[in-house]
Every structure is written in C-alpha cells, then in structure tokens.
Image (cartoon, grey):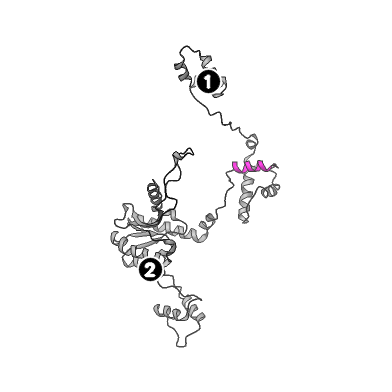
Amino acid sequence: MYDCLKKENIGMTDNAIVSRIHVLTKIGYKTIYTIIKLGTVTDHSLKRKRPNKKLGRIDIAAKDVIQRTVYNFYKENRVPTLELIPDRLRNFPEYNYTSLETLREILISCGFKYKKLDNRMVIMESRRIVELRREYLSKIKQYRNSNRNIIYLDETWFDTHDVVKYGWVDNTNNCALNTPCSRGKRVIILHAGSKDGFVSNALLLSAKNITKSSADYHADLFEKWFVKQLLPNIPPNSVIVMDNAPYHSRILNKIPNNNTKKDEILKFMQLKNITVPQKIPVKKELIRMIKSRNFKNEYVIDTICSRHGHTLLRLPPYYCIFNPIEMVWGTVKKIAKI
C-alpha cells in the first residue's frame, strides 16, 4: 500500500502517506513505520499468546503424579474426569492446586486430550490379538527372507455419484457443483497386487446392491473370482495375504456343537473317520467324542489355495494397516472423485 501511494502521489511526504494508510487501515502509526522499515506484515487481529507463568512453575514430580493418577483410573476400568481426579491428588503433597481450570491446563501440558474414548486400542492389545500379530509378523518376515512372491488382496467400494466434498467457496451460487443428490450405485472393487503392481486380469467390479445380497452371495462371488481370476494369474508357490472377512472364511465342514442336529453330527463323524458305537450315544456324548479330537475349522479358500500350491496367510484381526493395498484404495478413491 505504501509503495502504491508513493507512486500515485509523487510529491507526497512519507508522513502524509503514513497518515493516509492509518486512515484506511486503522493500524497505529508506529506499526506502519515498522512495517515500512522491515518490509514485513504481522496479523494484528490475533492476540499474542502469553506464556502461562503458573504452568512454568509446576515441577516434573507434580506432572508425574498427575500422569500416574490418570493411568490408575484406567487400570481400575474407570474414566478420569476433572471432578474425580482432584480427590486422588489430595493424597500427594507434590500437587497443591485447587482450581479445576489449572488442572485442565496441566493435563493438556502433559499431553492429555479430552476426546471420545477409543476402546479399540484395548482390544488390539489383548493377549490373543498380540499373539496373532506376532505370529503374522514372524511368518511374513520368513516368507520375505525366502524371496516368496507375496500377493495382497482386498475389497473396497465406491459410490458412483461421490464427489470431492471440500473446496474454496464464498457462499454464493457461483461456487456450487452441479452434482446428483443421491450417492448413486455402490460399486464393489476387488483386486490383488504385489511389489510388481496389480495382478493382471484380476480386477473385479460389481454393481449389485450389496445391502440386498446374502452372505452366501458374497462368498460365492469371492471364491469364483479367487479361482478364475486370481490363481491363474499369479506365480507358482505364492503367498496370498488377506483379512478374515466372513466371505473369506466360509467353513468347509463346520465342527458340530450342541445346537447341531444329531444326523449332521453323525455325518461329520463319518467324514472324519470317527468310529460310532453300534448303540448310538446321546448327542451330548457325540459332541464330547468330537471335542476330544481337537478339530480345527477348515476354510474353503484355504483348501483351494493349498490344492493349487499356494500359501494363505491371514491378517490378524483389526490390523488392516498391515495390508499395503489399503493405501492404494485411498489414492484410487481420491482420483475417482475429481
């Protein structure tokens, strides 16, 4: 602004130009002179954040007490709140503040945030999931060290009318997209890839209304794709990585339980070569005989994979992040919306 006024008013003094800028911008004279001298502009609409002197005086011991107090609440399976925490802190001489606002600021300075609790983390760190995670990581490392070809497969979906939802607008009709109100058809995308890229001829697109489809339809669709489009197009002795979605896990011969009909139990025993006494016992006794053999569920896909000379490796539950194709889907959807 200073440069423009100086060019337009050649005979105008610097003081007169500064006065004119002050009238137009309401910025103080001293600030205007500083900007002219330094050639920089500061946003004066924002107040400078002053350091909290009280927080600066809190020692490490007090912060440590607060951290341990919060963690102990969670160990007791209770939610710590600003109302409950002070009752515990009264037992510690290191903490001598009474204001809840001060406690809130200290919690923030310790790295805590007040937000929706995520119990998923607890599940992911349960003993069973940790064991499955370690087992997966050990196997995938072993396969990589053996130079096995590793194929990752996954499904995603995309709404045909989906568009970018964020952009620069000024709240006028000049900044409106001409897009349909509905989401359109939901397209299911099924594909697989490796370090060399997508598997050739393995792409499957399906626009069938999945909300009206049965679980058997999903399993049939997946198994047909697996046999006819994936297996013929991957190298021999490959490792195929996938998650535990229900349609990936159709059981070949379901192990009977107390709800299984007696004739189905007998069929299973015959299939597994379990000798049944001439005088057929009651159902409860048959179930006990089956349990004593420690059978594990056999899955259709695992059997198909093994029959074709490949190895199937399932991701641990809740760990889709171990599947690199997840990152590809994010990029694909972003491009499709443009």
Q: Could you tell me residue 8's position as x and y percent?
A: 45, 17
Image side of residue 124 versus residue 156, left or right: right
Magenta stretch containing residue 319, yes or no?
Answer: no
Give the spatial CA distance, label 1 vs label 2: 79 Å
**Mark 2 neighbour density, 10 Å: few (under 14) some (14–19) many (20 or more):** some
Q: Tell me if label 1 and label 2 are in contact, CB under 8 Å.
A: no
Element type at marker 1? helix
**Mark 1 neighbour density, 10 Å: few (under 14) some (14–19) many (20 or more):** some
The answer to whether residue 68 is visible is yes
**Numbered marks: total:** 2
The circle on residue 300 is: 2
The circle on residue 175 is: none
**Highlighted magenta segment, given as a residue range:** 96-109
Image side of residue 59 versus residue 226, left or right: right
Q: Quarter holding the C terminus?
A: top left
Element type at marker 2? helix
Q: Residue at x 42, y 78 (%)?
A: 268
